[in-house]
Image (tube, helix red, strand yellow):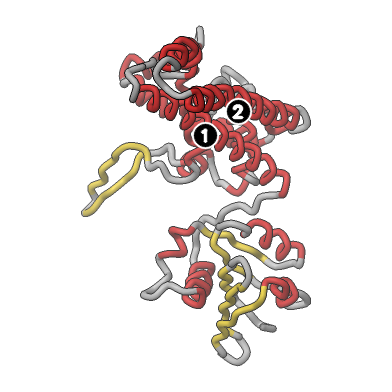
Amino acid sequence: MNNCAGVGVDIAKSVFQIHYVDQATGEIVNKAIKRAKFLQFFANRTRCRIGMEACGGAHHWARQLVMMGHEVRLMPAEFVKAFNIRNKNDAADARANWLAVQQPGKPVAVKTEMQQAMLALHRMRQQLIKFRTMQINELRGLLTEYGEVMGKGRAALDEAIPDVLARVAERLPAVVIDTLREQWNGLTKLDEQVAQIERRIRACKKDDKAVKAIGEIPGVGLLTATAAVAMMGNAKAFKSGREFAVWVGLVPKQTGSGGKVNLYGISKRGDAYLRTLLIHGARSVLEHAKEPGPWVEQMLRRRPKNVVTVALANKNARTIWAILAHDRAYQKDYVNVKPA
């Protein structure tokens, strides 16, 4: 592999598959390499472009290869899938990565360990909240079987369940009542775990200049700011704020033929978690802000509230990119003036 235009790598838990064409001999090489010898294979070799699918573990291996001097392009799974013809296996996946890395496209930014650490906190918090919601719904559903119907939401559950358990205790075995009470008390432990993670995220915010900068944007709170900085990687990897909004999935989906273009709802591409945070932040501005601003007020006169919410989320995404890419502070009344 002394002369190599590109290398396709399919990573796995134990065995990695590598595909490339030797430019000197024209030999097509598609070989399996053990995990322990993967970095050794690329060590002391001429610089080449390595393409990998952006999946679990990809950022770790990309960082290691970049340190060796290689160029690494992490590609979305949907982009690579288009080059996988017929049967799917490790050899075919490595060949698809090799074909895809030679095409123009938008690679996924290689994240640092600190960025991945922040995202790990977000994912664990999100998982705890999902489990807490499941527990609440499970308790409501089980007690409904005995004719006890409670309102939706945590507050309604906490208010009604003591009396509900007291009533059904006359009819059900004590072991069932004790178990239901333990599950209800377990919600408090989940609350404490979520709060602890949020405190740790808030502590990280104190030392991050970028998070502080975009945290001044109305509708961009602690979670949105830290998640945006961690997921974006290098803001300059995007050409414009619109490109970042496209990456998040906050632009209309398009279909067209014969010169006619049809626009639909938002594409919902990219990371659903960041998009959800941006939309919830925008909705909070519309419902609770005393002065949402003239731009929002004008939009509300012309468009439905949900449309304005997504539009504001799109605007906030572009503002986030502008602040990070140009290293500026947020200015409430800033007006972008195009050069003459």
Circle 2 is placed at which residue position? 190
User: Between disc 2 and disc 1, whose residue precedes?
Assistant: 1
Q: Quadrant of residue 14?
A: bottom right
* Mark 1 surroundings within 10 Å by alpha-carbon count, few (fewer than 14), some (14 through 19), many (20 or more): some
Q: Viewed as shown, does residue 304 lie left or right of 72?
A: left
Residue type at numbered disc 2: Leu
Asked if the residue at tag 1 contacts the one at tag 2, i.e. Cβ–Cβ closer than 8 Å, the answer is: yes
Q: Quadrant of residue 252?
A: top left
Q: Could you say whether the residue bearing mark 2 is in a helix, strand or loop?
A: helix
In the picture as drawn, the residue positioned furthest to the top comes out as: 290
Task: Measuring from the top left, give residue 95's x and y in whole percent.
Answer: 50, 75
Label disc, if present, on residue 131 of the rendered structure = 1
Mark 2 and mark 1: Cα distance apart in space: 9 Å
Out of 121 and 101, give the one closest to the viewer. Answer: 121
* Mark 2 surroundings within 10 Å by alpha-carbon count, few (fewer than 14), some (14 through 19), many (20 or more): some
Q: Could you say whether the residue bearing mark 1 is in a helix, strand or loop?
A: helix
**Residue 292 visible, this angle:** no
Task: Measuring from the top left, give residue 122's x and y in whole percent.
Answer: 61, 37
Q: Tell me what residue is drawn at x 62 percent, y 21 percent.
A: 331
Label disc, if present, on residue 217 of the rendered structure = none
Residue type at numbered disc 1: Phe
258, above or below 314, in the image:
below
78, above or below 311, in the image:
below
Task: Measuring from the top left, give residue 314's x and y in whole percent.
Answer: 46, 32
Out of 138 and 205, give the one closest to the viewer. Answer: 138
Task: Measuring from the top left, give residue 93's x and y in whole percent.
Answer: 49, 71
Quadrant containing the N terminus is: bottom right
Out of 80 and 155, give the one closest to the viewer. Answer: 155
221, above or below 268, in the image:
above
Q: Tell me what residue is drawn at x 67 percent, y 39 percent.
A: 118
